[in-house]
Image (cartoon, helix red, strand yellow):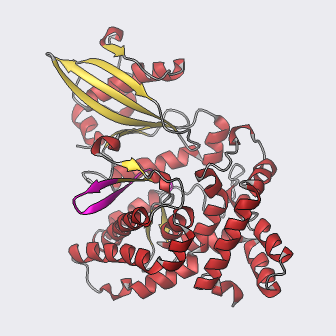
Amino acid sequence: MGNRLLQYELGLSQRNILSIKHRPHSIRMENSTTLDEESKFWLEEKLIPNLKLVLNQKECLVKYEILPTPAPLIMSSLFFLEIKFCANEKEKLYSLVVKRPARSEFLRELTQSDIIFHNEILFYNKCAKNSEDYPRCFFTLEEPPINSVIILENISKRGYHVCPQKGNLDVKYVVAAMQEIGKFHAKAYVQKEKCQSKFFEMLNNIKESRYTLEYRENNHFPFMINSLAKRVIQKLRSENYDKVFCDKAEVFFNNAFENVMMTAVNSKLPLATLCHGDFTRNNVFFRESDSGLKAMLFDFALITYGSPAIDLSTFLCLSAKREDRKNRFSEIFGAYHNSLMDYLKEAGLENLEKFSKERFFEDYKRHALFGYFIASFFLPVLLELEMPNLEIMTSEEEILATMSKIGGDKFTELVTEMLLDMREMGCLDHILN
């Protein structure tokens, strides 16, 4: 049962729930990773009383333990919480993931924290209820700038885990991820056709943090995207590569934000769909099942509406091996399309010719550069080649200086090869023509 319905039945608003007092001695902390005083107070005085209500454990003694997170995050503050409700010599254990906005004001502004929490809360309340395909959401609160929170199940308890490889994933992980994103896109196509008014009402409530031509003062993303290809063009010119290509690509990439990113987001019907928007290795979990490797999507802060290639190209550029992108693309793309079509058929959609594999491939070629530009700044971070300390940066120039050097010469070579592979596939034909 969703948290909003529970609150309605209890006759409580979210703000009222968070103001409820409890007996301090009813909460005990077990061996835990240290929390700062502010976080500990928030957890014991606000979150735990809230959870007791939502989970109908009002009269229970509470024991909790904070588990270490695997790595620091930029877009949010996250910790794992093990919480036991004890009553009548019985214990009920919940393993939870607690997401809050970043504590740093600069990072909140940089990541558009208010917007990304709004979007993820919207997704869990409108798209993910009662679905086993996503982590169970126990509670959400949208109260910017720092009090928003999302409480999810820790899906590791269901046997899910992050892929052990940080990049260059084995093809079985790539295929499983593509099958899951195919089903994700198909669900949106079904909703768009069968529940059109509700679907577009939800879309209209999505707030855009990155892909808008209204350049906000604290939105550094357009500036960064328009500068990312300079290192590659310089390298190609230094090697006397095709001058006509370099000239045309340089002009096109100087406005890559509009020519690539915005074009993909503004992709037209019928293939436009709800996209995960941050389809990276960090946001896909896997587990072995009787039918093979199963994937589950996580973190919906950057959901957007546009070309399905937004997700496909992002994952392939960030996570697939170069040889698999080149030599096994048909297999990988086929896994995506077959999963999508299976879901559409099961849902009873008709006139499926508009979802042909050929149309998806043409759409992919037209928008594949989207993933290329995401990889141009995020792949070094994902591979831990170099982790910039964004928290100490205060200007676009500082961010650009760091991003243009991230990964060094080795990474420049990698993204240059990736661009030329895309040209060979036909993904840059629209630039040259």
Q: Is residue 249 left or right of residue 419?
A: right
Task: Determine if the magenta segment contains residue 286.
Answer: no
Q: Position of residue 131 (x, y in %)?
A: 26, 54
Task: Between residue 245 and residue 114, name the one nearer to us.
Answer: 245
Q: In this view, does 206 lie above or below 136?
A: below
Task: Between residue 27 and residue 411, name the one nearer to us.
Answer: 411
Task: Between residue 119 and residue 287, name the one nearer to us.
Answer: 287
Residue drawn where x is 47% and y is 83% of the image: 361
Q: In this view, does 61 lie above or below 185?
A: above
- Determine which quarter of the picture holds residue 248: bottom right
Residue drawn where x is 32% and y is 72% of the image: 339
Q: Where is residue 399 in the image (x, y as percent from the top left)?
A: 75, 50
Q: Is residue 293 left or right of residue 59?
A: right
> Residue lying furthest top in this view?
25
> Residue lying furthest bottom in this view?
433
- Determine which quarter of the picture holds residue 376: bottom right
Q: Is residue 49 left or right of residue 274?
A: left
Q: Where is residue 151 in the image (x, y as percent from the top left)?
A: 38, 38
User: Is residue 300 visible in this depiction of the protein?
Assistant: no
User: Is residue 429 visible in this depiction of the protein?
Assistant: yes
Q: Quadrant of the C terminus?
A: bottom right
- Determine which quarter of the picture holds residue 170: bottom left
Q: Is residue 415 left or right of residue 76?
A: right
Q: In which quarter of the image is the N terminus?
A: top left
Task: Between residue 255 and residue 244, name the one nearer to us.
Answer: 244
> Residue lying furthest left in this view?
88
How many numbered dots are placed on residues in this image? 0
Question: Magenta part of the protein: which range?
Answer: 287-302
Task: Determine if the magenta segment contains residue 292.
Answer: yes
Residue drawn where x is 36% and y is 10% of the image: 24
